[in-house]
Amino acid sequence: MLDSIMESKLRIRKTQSLRRGRVSVPNARYFVTICVEDRKPVLCSEKNWKAIRDQLESQQREGDLKLHCAVLMPDHLHLVFRLGERLKLGHVIGKFKAKLDIEVLWQKDFYDHMLQADDSEESYGLYLFMNPYRASLVELDAEWEFWKRWREAPFDFEEFLREGEVIPTQWISESEKVKAGIIKRDAW
């Protein structure tokens, strides 16, 4: 009885399940989510965003990854990138967490999804871009300052963005379809 009470009071994370099925394929495209411990909303500051971008770009220069886009949320970071040939996926993310110079405690593991050949990077870019709008952190007529695209060519959706114009509300439902597809594919 005491054991069941203690177990219900203690939050037990099973991060090993995040590693199940994880593969590191050099040059594969990945969608990754890295969360703050206990999902504390402590990330969104200009100082943290600069440090995160600087660390990611440092790892890109070192050949760990080729960045496509990222969005910083209050309690997590989403990335889309191509894995380099030097390190495994877990080592790339571990290096990022270890070398990042901000006062944040990260969850021990991370969520990853390897994009398949027929997965549209455009859809993942839209998903990341729309994340703060879906979470109602910013109005559709405002710009979220913690979003970055590194790839040379803009995403198609960026062509429709005009300064001062409202982001179409249907983009929220379109980005939700990406999330549903990721969850469905990874639930097997």
Image: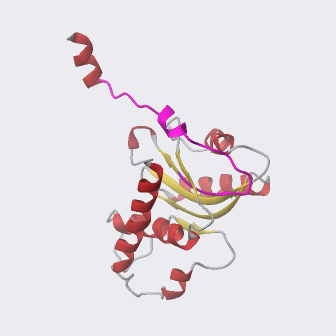
**Residue occupying the point 42% across, 54% down:** 183
Tell me where residue 160 appears, x and y as whole percent.
49, 87
Spot occupied by residue 10 in the image (x, y as percentages of width and height)? 31, 24
Q: Is residue 176 left or right of residue 86?
A: left
Q: Main secondary structure of the magenta part?
A: loop
Q: Please tell me in which quadrant of the rendered image residue 81 appears.
A: bottom right
Viewer-nearest residue: 137 or 103: 137
Magenta-drawn stretch contains 24: yes
Q: Indicate the quadrant where residue 170 lies.
A: bottom left
Residue at horizontal 58 percent and vertical 78 percent from the top:
155
Q: Is residue 139 above or below residue 110?
A: below
Q: Is residue 45 above or below residue 18?
A: below
Relative depth, front residue between 188 and 4: 188
What x and y, as percent, mark residue 176?
A: 38, 66
Residue positioned most to the top: 2
Q: Is residue 112 above or below residue 94?
A: below
Residue found at x 48% / y 35%: 17
Residue 102 occupies quadrant: top right
Quadrant of the snapshot with the N terminus: top left
Check if residue 18 falls in the magenta segment: yes
Relative to 147, 37 lies left or right: left
Residue 137 visible, this orientation: no
Q: Position of residue 154 (x, y in %)?
A: 61, 79
**Boundaries of the magenta span:** 10-32
- The correct choice, above or below, for 45 with respect to 142 in the image is above
